[in-house]
Each structure stands twice: as structure tokens, then as C-alpha cells.
Image: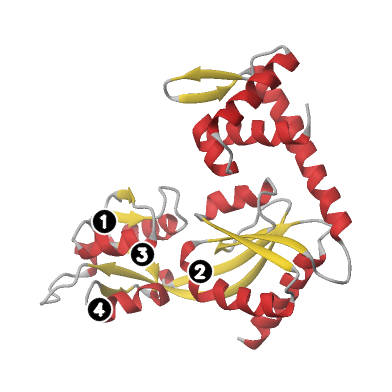
């Protein structure tokens, strides 16, 4: 049993299937299957229950996962300790919510690459909850998420505030009131989307009894779905102004208590941050002061 086996085991445990774990790891599916089978043979215990609905951990698998998380975390700490130095080098794995990737992250990465050409940034996008788990499992060094978040073992740095708006299909006559739009299905990135709590509070305030949530994947899919009349969505104004100018959606301002949307950066509590990560945090802090 080596670190590679444990990382593969972790991925299958988290994803609940061989195929999803292979995609997450960028491995061939047959390789993941073989490694899991070999690990079970080595330990002489079944680690997963197999069914048509996927794979779930056996009691032995649950016990192994506790140790796998600790071991993989210690390996990460060791790697970071080795990479500590004055000159940033190596890889920098970053995560970002999709709405922050182009407006916020792209210019920062361009500046970072110009300063530190020996660092290779790698970017993964996802939802806030997914990205938090990636940082906790050390799959990425840090991530931009919607905040503010108080997460044990993670540092949180506020980066900026956005205005949250409601987008709806374009209409020749703006006859609908906010309450009528809120009664329609809401298209979100994921069912557990951070905006949902704000949406539920807004609906209660506006006297709308229930929320209908549809998971709709990407920003482009959400905008196209709203434009086609499939529902409405809550998104940062900066990400939808161009769609409004093209006549694809109409933007509604929300009542004052619900407009605020904070974006922050999370990263692990650690004494062993690599030179690449320390340089990234320094750039973020400088950018905050200049904005």
C-alpha cells in the first residue's frame, strides 16, 4: 500500500464510483479498478459495497478512509515543506467558482505568471461546497469561493464584494413584479449552491412559499436557460451585464439586504506554505489594497 493507492481509494470513496474517480484523477478507468482490487487483496478485506447505484464504503473502508485522509494530508505537508524557499517554483493548483474565474482570476494569473515564470498554475472550477472539499483534501492549494465562510482548518481572506441580482427572460413589456419572477424555477450551478440560502430568505421576505431549484451546470447554460424562459437565477451583476446588453436576459435589482455577495479565498492552516503559494497570497493582498 502506497500513497498513490490511498489517493485513488480516497477519490473512489468521495466520488462514489470508479468512473467518476477516474475522471477526477485523470486516470484510465481500468487502472483505478485494478488498483482498488489490489488494495482489497493486500488488506484481505472488502473496502466497498458495489451496486447499480455506485460504490459505498464497508466498515473496513470507513476505517481506512480515516487513516488515508491523515496520511495524504501529511504527505501534502511534507511536499510543501520541501518546496519552501525564496524563489517560487513548481505547481500552484487553484480552484475557483466559475463566476470569478474570468473577471477576477484571469488578470491575477496573468500578473502572477509574468512575475513568477517558474510556477505552473493549474485551475479547476466548481461550486463553493465542492471547492471547499478540494482544499480540505489538498487537491488544490486554495480556491475562490462565495463567503464569508468559517471553516475549521482553513484560512479565509475576503477578496471583493459583488452585487447579487435576479435575471429573467427578456420581455417587451416589463409587467412582472419581483414576486412573480420568484415563483418560477431557479436555475443554479448546483443544488447546494451558496446563493440558495439568500434565495430562500428572499422568498420568505417576499411571501413566496416555496423554492423550485434546478441544477443547471455552467454559467452559459444558466443564461441560455433563463433566456429561453425555463426559469430565473441569482447571479453577480458583473457576470450578466453583457448578456443583458445582447438582449438575452433582463436584470432585476434585489432588495438591499439581499444584494451583497462576498467572494473570498480559502487555503489550509499550515506553517509549511510553498514559495509559490506565499507569492500568490502576497499578490492577492496587494491586489486587495489596490482595488
Badge 4 is on which residue? 246
Count how many numbered circles sit on residues in the image. 4
Q: On residue 268, which mark appears?
A: none
**N-terminal label among 2 and 3:** 2
Disc 2 is placed on an element classified as helix
Front tag of 4 and 1? 4
* Quadrant position of the C terminus in the picture: bottom right
Badge 3 is on which residue? 234
Furthest residue toward bottom: 290
What residue appears at the point 88 percent right and 55 percent down from the top-left corner?
82
**Marks 4 and 1, Cα distance to the nearest angstrom?**
30 Å
**N-terminal label among 4 and 1:** 1
| Image vertical order of residue 123 relative to residue 236, above or below | above
Neighbours of disc 3 within 10 Å: few (<14), some (14-19), many (20+): many
Badge 2 is on which residue? 100
Front tag of 2 and 3? 2
What residue appears at the point 32 percent right and 60 percent down from the top-left corner?
222
Is 252 left, or right, of 290 in this rendering? left
Neighbours of disc 1 within 10 Å: few (<14), some (14-19), many (20+): some
Amino acid at each position: 500500500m502506497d500513497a498513490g493507492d490511498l489517493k485513488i481509494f480516497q477519490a473512489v470513496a468521495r466520488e462514489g464510483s470508479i468512473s467518476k474517480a477516474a475522471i477526477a484523477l485523470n486516470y484510465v478507468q481500468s487502472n483505478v479498478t485494478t488498483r482498488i482490487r489490489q488494495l482489497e487483496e493486500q488488506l484481505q478485506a472488502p473496502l466497498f459495497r458495489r451496486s447499480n447505484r455506485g460504490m459505498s464504503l464497508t466498515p473496513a473502508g470507513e476505517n481506512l478512509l480515516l487513516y488515508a485522509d491523515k496520511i495524504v494530508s501529511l504527505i501534502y505537508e511534507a511536499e510543501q515543506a520541501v518546496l519552501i524557499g525564496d524563489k517560487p517554483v513548481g505547481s500552484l493548483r487553484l480552484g475557483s467558482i466559475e463566476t470569478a474565474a474570468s473577471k477576477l482570476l484571469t488578470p491575477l494569473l496573468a500578473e502572477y505568471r509574468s512575475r513568477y515564470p517558474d510556477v505552473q498554475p493549474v485551475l479547476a472550477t466548481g461550486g463553493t461546497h465542492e471547492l471547499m472539499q478540494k482544499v480540505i483534501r489538498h487537491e488544490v492549494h486554495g480556491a475562490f469561493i462565495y463567503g464569508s465562510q468559517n471553516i475549521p482548518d482553513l484560512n479565509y481572506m475576503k477578496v471583493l464584494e459583488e452585487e447579487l441580482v435576479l435575471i429573467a427572460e427578456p420581455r417587451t413589456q416589463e409587467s412582472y413584479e419581483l414576486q412573480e419572477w420568484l415563483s418560477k424555477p431557479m436555475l443554479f450551478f448546483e443544488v447546494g449552491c451558496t446563493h440558495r440560502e439568500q434565495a430562500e430568505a428572499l422568498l420568505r421576505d417576499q411571501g413566496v412559499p416555496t423554492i423550485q431549484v434546478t441544477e443547471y451546470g455552467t454559467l452559459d447554460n444558466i443564461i441560455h436557460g433563463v433566456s429561453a424562459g425555463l426559469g430565473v437565477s441569482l447571479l453577480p451583476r458583473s457576470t450578466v451585464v453583457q448578456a443583458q446588453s445582447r438582449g438575452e436576459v433582463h436584470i432585476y435589482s434585489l432588495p438591499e439586504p439581499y444584494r451583497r455577495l462576498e467572494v473570498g479565498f480559502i487555503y489550509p492552516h499550515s506553517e509549511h506554505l510553498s514559495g509559490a503559494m506565499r507569492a500568490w497570497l502576497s499578490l492577492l493582498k496587494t491586489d486587495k489594497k489596490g482595488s
